[in-house]
Image (spheres, grey):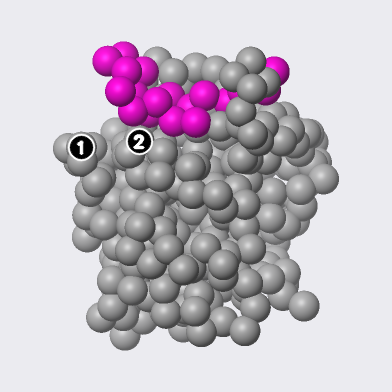
Amino acid sequence: MKKAVIIDTDPGIDDAVALGIGLFSDQLDVKLITTVAGNVGIHYVTENMLKLLTFWDMNIPVAQGADGPLLREVKDASDVHGVTGMAGYEFPAPNREYLLEETAVEAMHRTLMASGEKMTIIAIGPLTNIALLLKTYPEVKERIEELVLMGGALGRGNFGILSEFNIAIDPEAAKIVFESGLSIAVAPLDVGLKALVYPEDSEKIKDMNQTGDMMYHLFKKYRGGSFGTGLKMYDSCALAYVLSPEMFDIKETFVAVETAGEYTAGATIIDLNNKLGKDKNCRVCVDVDEDKFKDWFLQAISQCK
């Protein structure tokens, strides 16, 4: 039976790749997609999501979410993804019929409560929408099987010295989520750094199908690594955990988010050696088999339209 999921996202080039993998997987039933400001602003990420669904001719409801963090000023990653988030490919005009009038929080609440089974949420952007959902409708916790997220770092960050982008954009939201008591799995920055698409892989992807050609052109604009030396597929690692967890080395541990530090706000405290003596609250992917990931990734793209 397919796993019922909600995907919360901020596309973004690596999000677009992860979304293609998730939407075409025969293991997932994507019931709802919600957007959140992150890689670029909320207008752009929502338009990008609608463009992708139109490109794939998939009628999946989309709900627009938070336009910025709970408390902090809005920042983005347009230096990595370009101003619009998905430059480099000529997409069809977005079908706006996919866009719900509900907010992301309202749509997630309705979808979760109406489901006949517990659902998995896959969050591959800042955690603002998820925190707002949990605070507004705490009863949804009983309807969530697992929250799988791309975020955090075991060591150095890609946004702050010790902070990864998705967590650092809204540390207060991340803190709420990690303290929620949900069953949480984390694909941190470190496995994304090993989940690379090399030039020879890009050439294979280009000729696979329409989606592969689209991704190839997006890759040419993506600054998440280098087109010549390997592009980092951070968000796809969250999908890989859901679909093929055996490729990861997974540790159960305590994870907290720093919100008060002058230089460390947004850092994830991943206590692998139990120095804090806290109860374990997450499953963290601490390593990935790079060869298995590459084989899985190429196979997953080949299943797209």
Q: Is residue 264 above or below residue 119?
A: above
Q: Residue at x 48, y 42 (%)?
A: 179
Disc 2, SS: helix
Residue 116 left/right relative to 177: right
Residue 103 figure quarter: bottom left
Residue 54 left/right relative to 119: left
Q: Position of residue 264 (x, y in %)?
A: 36, 18
Disc 1, SS: loop
- For residue 52, the mark is none
Q: Amino acid at mark 1?
A: Arg
Residue 218 appearing in the image: no
Q: Position of residue 56 (x, y in %)?
A: 50, 74
Q: Which residues are magenta?
A: 256-273
Q: Residue furthest left?
A: 73
Characterize the local packing of mark 1: few (<14), some (14-19) or many (20 or more) Cα atoms within 10 angstroms. Answer: few
Which image quarter holds the C terminus?
A: bottom right
Predominant secondary structure, magenta span? loop
Q: Position of residue 104 (x, y in %)?
A: 34, 68
The CA distance from mark 2 to mark 1 is 9 Å
Residue identified by numbered label 2:
171
Q: Residue at x 63, y 46 (%)?
A: 185
Residue 247 left/right relative to 71: right
Looking at the picture, tell me which residue is in the foreground, 245 or 79: 245
- Asked whether the beta carbons under mark 2 and mark 1 sit within 8 Å of each other, the answer is yes
Q: Is residue 261 magenta?
A: yes
Q: Residue at x 35, y 35 (%)?
A: 171
Residue identified by numbered label 1:
72
Q: Earlier in the sequence, mark 2 or mark 1?
A: 1
Q: Is residue 66 above or below residue 103?
A: above
Q: Position of residue 124 (x, y in %)?
A: 48, 50
Q: Residue at x 61, y 40 (%)?
A: 281
